[in-house]
Amino acid sequence: INAEYMGEKASLKPYKLPNPVGFNKKKIDEWLKTPTVAIVSKSYCPYCKKVKDVFNGFVNDKSVKLEESQLYVWEIDYDDECAQIQDYMKTITGGRSRHAR
């Protein structure tokens, strides 16, 4: 939570770690460990959209204890090093892609 400083209003929104930029294993690992749910996505992928929709539904469902601040989405297709990032994710997950079924 951002504290009030020099007369500026305090923000009650929880801080979110920014998405990594480029292929940097240390920053990617740090980003993956931060949220409750980390989704590494491609903006045009229909399977990724399904997964994001499911988790956004959980955020909006008050019976599920998942806050928006706990859900991180990284659209790697906007990154110049997308292929390297996807290859690295394979070393972590065992696959270059994880499809929702």
Image (cartoon, helix red, strand yellow):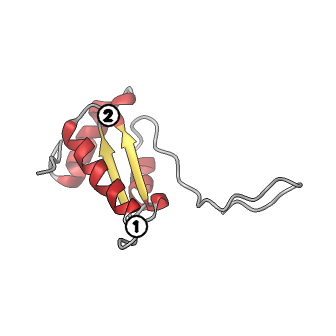
Q: Is residue 4 left or right of residue 96?
A: right
- In the image, 95 versus 74, the foreground residue is 74
* Mark 1 crowd level (few <14, some 14–19, many ≥20, 10 Å Cα): some
Q: Residue 66's mark?
A: 1
Q: Identify the amino acid type marked 1.
A: Leu
Which quadrant holds residue 11? bottom right
Q: Is residue 92 left or right of residue 13?
A: left
Residue 54 in sight from this viewpoint: yes
In the rendered image, which quarter contains the N terminus? bottom right
- From what the image shows, is residue 55 above or below residue 46? below
* Mark 2 crowd level (few <14, some 14–19, many ≥20, 10 Å Cα): some
Q: Position of residue 12 (x, y in %)?
A: 66, 62
Rounded to the nearest angstrom, the CA distance separating label 2 from label 1 is 22 Å
Residue, x 36% and y 73% (percent of image)?
Answer: 63
Q: Position of residue 87 (x, y in %)?
A: 23, 39
Residue, x 61% and y 59% (percent of image)?
Answer: 13
Q: Position of residue 15 (x, y in %)?
A: 59, 57
Find disc 2 in the rendering and name its residue: 43
- In the image, 42 versus 57, the foreground residue is 57
Residue 25 in sight from this viewpoint: no
Number of residue marks? 2
